Amino acid sequence: FLYFIGIETYFTNTTKLMRVPLRAVVALSGGVDSSVAAALLVKYGRHVGVDVVGAAHMTNWSAASEADGADSSAPPLGCGAEKDLAAAVADRLRLPFHHCEFEADFFTLVFRPTVDAFRGGGSANPDCVCNRAIKFDRFAHHARRAF
């Protein structure tokens, strides 16, 4: 996931039209895909007018989110390893790193409505809701403020 801060803009100088590079924040999951994408964008982004200004990791769920009586022998979700890996990638790429906590928003805006829809016999697409409510709303606002 990549969030562009603002849109590509052009402005006119008295003699020529100048292109202003896009500023981008990469979201790092701690996995291989987002890490490689970030590394490639850092390395080659300037060639296509993209300046990567930071990286962020989102925590949307954790062991504390689990219902009472959850299997305590199971490894906790969002145990922190992913955040640590994402931070290490950002450090290696020399990018400022921010961690975003969206657990309460995720529970209220994504998880609870999904469960309610299933209980009522409906169908829900939590991925689409998460993209709209968390990634493209909460995360985008965080990226603008943080970077």
Image (cartoon, rainbow, N blue to C red):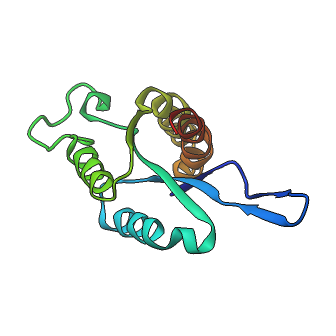
Residue lying at 60% horizontally and 35% vertically, measured from the top left: 141
Q: Nearer the viewer, residue 80 or 105?
A: 80
> Picture coordinates of residue 102 (x, y %)?
45, 32
Q: How many numbered marks, from 0 up?
A: 0
Decide if residue 20 is on the left or right side of residue 14.
left
Residue lying at 41% horizontally and 31% vertically, measured from the top left: 103
Decide if residue 67 is on the left or right side of residue 10.
left
Q: Which residue appears farthest toward the right when viewing the image?
A: 14
Residue lying at 20% horizontally and 28% vertically, measured from the top left: 69
Q: Is residue 44 above or below residue 27?
A: below
> Picture coordinates of residue 36 (x, y %)?
36, 69
Q: Is residue 58 above or below residue 32?
A: above
Q: Is residue 30 visible?
A: yes
Decide if residue 47 is on the left or right side of residue 17.
left
Residue 66, by quadrant, is top left
Q: Nearer the viewer, residue 92 or 123?
A: 92
> Picture coordinates of residue 19 (x, y %)?
75, 64
Residue lying at 27% horizontally and 42% vertically, measured from the top left: 78
Q: Is residue 106 above or below residue 35?
A: above
> Picture coordinates of residue 2 (x, y %)?
53, 57
Q: Nearer the viewer, residue 102 or 130?
A: 102
Q: Is residue 124 visible?
A: no
Q: Nearer the viewer, residue 107 or 13?
A: 13
Residue 51, by quadrant, is bottom right
